[in-house]
Amino acid sequence: MPFAEVDPVLRDLLKSFARPVQTVKPHLPFWFLRSDGIWEVEDLALLPIGADDSPTLGNMRAHARGGFTKDVQDAFHRSPECTEAVAELLLTSHFPETRFDELMDAVGLVL
C-alpha cells in the first residue's frame, strides 16, 4: 500500500488512540515497523534517511509503499484465526479494554 494513501487515516488514528504528542508523525510507525520483521517498505533507495533515522514525511508520501511480508500475508490468508489472535494481542498489549470497541470500529475490525 502506498504511504500517501494511509497517511491521513493513520494520522487520525494516532491522534485518537496514541499517547498525546505535540506533532503527530504517521510516517514513523510505517517506517519503523520494519524492525519487527513482519512489515516491509519497498523502494528503500528512494528514501534517504534523515536526522531521526527515517525518511522525511515528503519522501515517504512521494515514494514509500509498504505492507506485511509475504510470509505474514500468507499466514493471515491461511488462517483467519491467526489474524484474530494478532489483533487481540495488539489490543490487549497496547490499549485499555475500555477503548477496544472504539478502536475496532475505527479500523473496521470485527472479532
Image: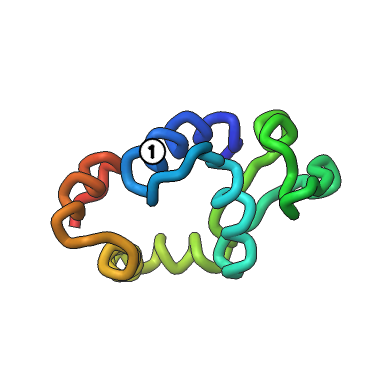
Q: Which residue is at 14% across, 56% downward?
A: 98
Residue type for callout 1: Lys
Q: Which residue is at 37% across, 40% downward?
A: 13
Question: Closer to the camera, 48 or 84?
Answer: 48
x then y, percent, for residue 40:
64, 57
Q: Is residue 35 above or below residue 99?
A: below
Q: Which residue is at 59% across, 37% downward?
A: 3
x then y, percent, for residue 59:
74, 34
Quarter the C terminus occupies: bottom left
Identify the image quadrant of residue 97.
bottom left
Q: Secondary structure at mark 1?
A: helix
Q: Is 6 on the left or on the right of 105, as rendered?
A: right
x then y, percent, for residue 50:
79, 46
Residue at the front extreme of this rendering: 22
Residue that numbered label 1 is attached to: 15
Question: Closer to the camera, 18 or 47?
Answer: 18
Quarter the N terminus occupies: top right
Question: Closer to the camera, 61 or 38?
Answer: 61
Q: Is residue 8 above or below residue 94?
A: above
x then y, percent, for residue 49:
80, 48
Identify the image quadrant of residue 32.
bottom right
